[in-house]
Image (cartoon, rainbow, N blue to C red):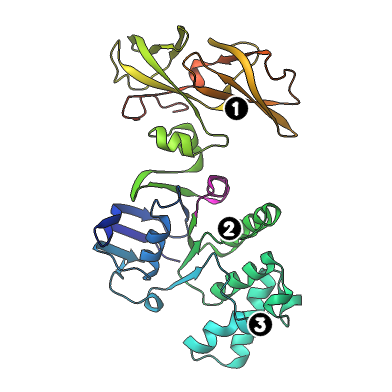
Amino acid sequence: MAAVELKGVRKRFDRQEAIRGVDLSIASGEFCVFVGPSGCGKSTLLRIVAGLEDVSDGQVLIGGVDVTDKAPRERGIAMVFQSYALYPHMTVHDNIAFGLETGRKLSRDEIDRKVRDAAETLALTPLLDRLPRQLSGGQRQRVAIGRAIVRQPEVFLFDEPLSNLDATLRVQMRIEIAKLHREMQTTMIYVTHDQVEAMTLADKIVVLNAGRIEQVGSPVELYERPRNTFVAGFIGSSRMNFLDCRAAEVSADGVTVVLPGDVTLKVPAARAEVAVGDEVTLGFRPEHVELEAGDALLEAPVEVIEELGDGHLMYLRAADGTLVNGRFAGAARLHHGEMGRFFLVGERCHLFDKEGRALTRVGS
């Protein structure tokens, strides 16, 4: 296993800059996830680490060695793609062995041992004589991972490997990939647009937007202390609610804001970079809304109820027309058109300036 470091990495396609000066350090043995919306540059950045894309500027270091100009096969990496890329005429055994047979001078016995060790790790041993068409989607993806494992790389790269699987298989494969990381302790970089995958798998999450890093941190840090409204809105399911408001009072221990409908709420501020009268944005997560009591009340007719089985989402429209939601346990006790009440707790709310930068650090 090896550390990975990106220094001032940029990538231009014609006149468009896809990666805009990325600096990033990934520790040896760390599970790092690149996450962000479509087109943010996460797959391009992974391909740069792999050597499948050249950099326009900057350096890529793996294990302390500058590999910026080295070919993929010289970087000590193995990559698992969204498409399984299996050879349809080859058995599972031969698909896993293919890279060893073409890239190294190993005896047949040694290749067979490595293949069977990987198959045992991935519960593929009973399937070694099958062809890809005889496998499920999850089994095919495990074969693709097995092909990477036998190469014993210093760094594993995963490019949205679960996107082609149904919801049940995605959960199963997430568990298997997490277990694989614990057992192998190899550096892994994983790309996904699914923030649930990012939160459940990562030691470190890198949130990308338009080719730039918005924030790097642990799943808990990004959830509790987002740096800006982009990260706050992207991390968490359902997404954070946002309301435009105005700072009415600023003190050492917090900021009192006026919400739509002239509702006031005091939000503790770790750094009160805001003055009375400033326009700010209040953020609060659906799971932090209370039904019985709190520091401020939003009241409006219920617009939508979404039943989730173990709970429900209730949507109200704030006085300025913004649709906000709360997540609650159990079945809904209200129906469309009935008066709903959301209580907000200041200590669980976030505050952002008009540029979207965090003014509060909840949970710090």
Q: Is residue 69 above or below residue 45?
A: below
Circle 3 Cα neighbour tier, 10 Å, few/some/many (<14 / 14–19 / ≥20): many
- The span shown in magenta is 192-202
Q: Position of residue 110 (x, y in %)?
A: 59, 88
Q: How many marks?
A: 3
Q: Quadrant of the N terminus?
A: bottom left
Q: CA distance from mark 1 to mark 2?
A: 27 Å
Q: Which residue is mark 1?
A: 287
Q: Position of residue 139 (x, y in %)?
A: 69, 68
* Residue 196: in magenta span: yes
Q: CA distance from mark 1 to mark 3?
A: 47 Å
Q: Is residue 292 above or below residue 134?
A: above
Q: Disc 1 residue type?
A: Glu
Q: Which mark is residue 163?
A: 2
Q: Which residue is mark 3?
A: 93
Q: Quadrant of residue 340?
A: top right
Q: Position of residue 94 (x, y in %)?
A: 63, 85
* Residue 347: in magenta span: no
Relative to residue 291, is residue 157 drawn left or right?
A: left
Q: CA distance from mark 2 to mark 3?
A: 24 Å
Mark 1 vs 2, N-terminal side? 2
Callout 1: SS = helix
What residue do we see at 46% from left, 16% from top? 320
